[in-house]
Image (spheres, helix red, strand yellow):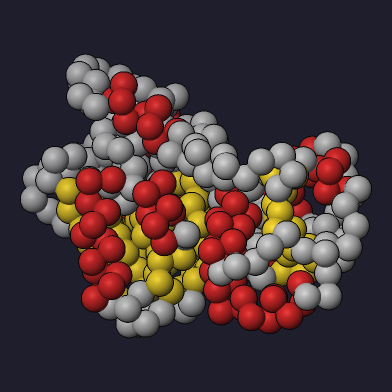
């Protein structure tokens, strides 16, 4: 397995890149905009294809690299469904899994630092974002933070993992790189021998200044997806009612199997996950030759816009996409099959 921890010294942020082996698919957790070149270099050196970029929460102390990585690599982006964001490929809920070639990440919804905080678990490792630090934890005094919720997230979600689980935090300010669940249970001064009430008392009296970049970083991180597909035009970016009355087009669902199981799909569609689209493009071309064209759709319209960009570059004509995804299709009362 390829595992790489990157560090951004300006915001003291850790970023993690995971892949099964050289030449396989990769995913990245909490990328920092200013460090995107480092990630691309590492991906190139190891012949990795970035297919997923995810943030543990909307960050307040640095600009996210999600948008730039997506624009360059056409990876999908993931954030908690609680995140107040305009465009994202997949909105995560507790218990979801993110699968790439040879790696499966489990999503734990862990509110407290913010109300959109998640941790990700894979193969004896947990990526804790700002929910749990080494001998510390994220603050709870902005972005709908809640000290009691954070205490519960840590004690009921993280501290029920095996003691030897590696803890890979979102930040460290003291030069440490990793810990374990067992060590944090015994050595984290915010928790060890503390009641929930005592923890809340500590967190409510930290009186920290706001992060310097907060007023810039938060809106940037909520709108990293803006602008994608803006040039497509009405005839290409379809609303649900336009798709419902369209005939003769091949419908391609770009979501992962788990997402389709959760909400269903549109009748007579075929499924090609975005990460497999490039490899399937010649087969797709053959199928489109027998149709008027192709309509891509996904959960919220980000992956379908990326697919449309990619296939246009390859010379596909008559491509369209469902602009706000199957979420809007369902919201406006259109049928799905399970
Ligand atoms: Fe944070």
The number of discs equals 0
Where does residue 326 sit, x and y in percent of width and height? 74, 49
Point out the image quarter for the C terminus: bottom right
**Who is closer to the viewer here, 248 or 239?**
248
Where does residue 82 sit, x and y in percent of width and height? 54, 36
Q: Is residue 276 above or below residue 12?
A: below
**Residue in the image at 43% along x and 52% along y:** 71
Image quadrant in which you'd find residue 149: top left
Q: Residue furthest left?
A: 175
**Residue in the image at 30% along x and 70% along y:** 43
**Who is closer to the viewer here, 40 or 134?**
40
Where does residue 235 sit, x and y in percent of width and height? 74, 44
Q: Is residue 52 visible?
A: no
Q: Is residue 287 above or below residue 171?
A: below
Is residue 326 rendered to the left or right of residue 151?
right
**Residue in the image at 59% along x and 71% along y:** 277
């Amino acid at each position: 397995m390829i595992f790489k921890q990157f560090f951004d010294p300006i915001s003291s942020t850790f970023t993690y890149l995971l892949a099964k082996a050289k030449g396989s698919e990769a995913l990245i957790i909490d990328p920092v905009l200013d460090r995107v070149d480092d990630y691309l270099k590492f991906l190139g050196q190891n012949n990795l294809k970035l297919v997923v970029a995810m943030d543990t929460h909307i960050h307040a102390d640095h600009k996210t690299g999600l948008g730039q990585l997506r624009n360059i690599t056409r990876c999908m982006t993931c954030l908690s469904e609680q995140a107040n964001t305009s465009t994202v490929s997949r909105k995560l809920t507790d218990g979801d899994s993110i699968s790439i070639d040879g790696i499966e990440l489990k999503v734990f919804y862990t509110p407290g630092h913010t109300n959109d905080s998640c941790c990700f678990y894979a193969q004896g490792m947990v990526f804790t974002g700002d929910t749990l630090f080494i001998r510390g934890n994220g603050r709870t005094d902005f972005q709908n933070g809640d000290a009691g919720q954070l205490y519960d997230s840590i004690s009921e979600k993280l501290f029920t993992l095996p003691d030897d689980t590696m803890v890979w935090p979102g930040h460290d300010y003291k030069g440490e790189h990793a810990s374990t669940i067992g060590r944090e249970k015994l050595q984290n001064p915010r928790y060890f021998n503390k009641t929930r009430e005592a923890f809340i008392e500590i967190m409510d009296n930290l009186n920290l200044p706001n992060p310097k970049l907060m007023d810039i970083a938060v809106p940037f991180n909520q709108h990293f997806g803006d602008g994608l597909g803006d040039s497509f035009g009405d005839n290409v970016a379809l609303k649900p009612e336009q798709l419902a009355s369209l005939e003769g087009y091949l419908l391609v669902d770009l979501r992962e199997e788990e997402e389709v199981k959760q909400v269903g799909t549109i009748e007579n569609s075929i499924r090609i996950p975005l990460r497999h689209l490039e490899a399937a493009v010649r087969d797709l071309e053959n199928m489109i030759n027998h149709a008027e064209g192709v309509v891509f759709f996904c959960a919220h319209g980000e992956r379908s816009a990326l697919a449309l960009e990619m296939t246009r570059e390859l010379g596909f004509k008559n491509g369209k996409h469902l602009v706000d995804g199957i979420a809007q299709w369902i919201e406006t009362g259109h049928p799905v099959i399970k």
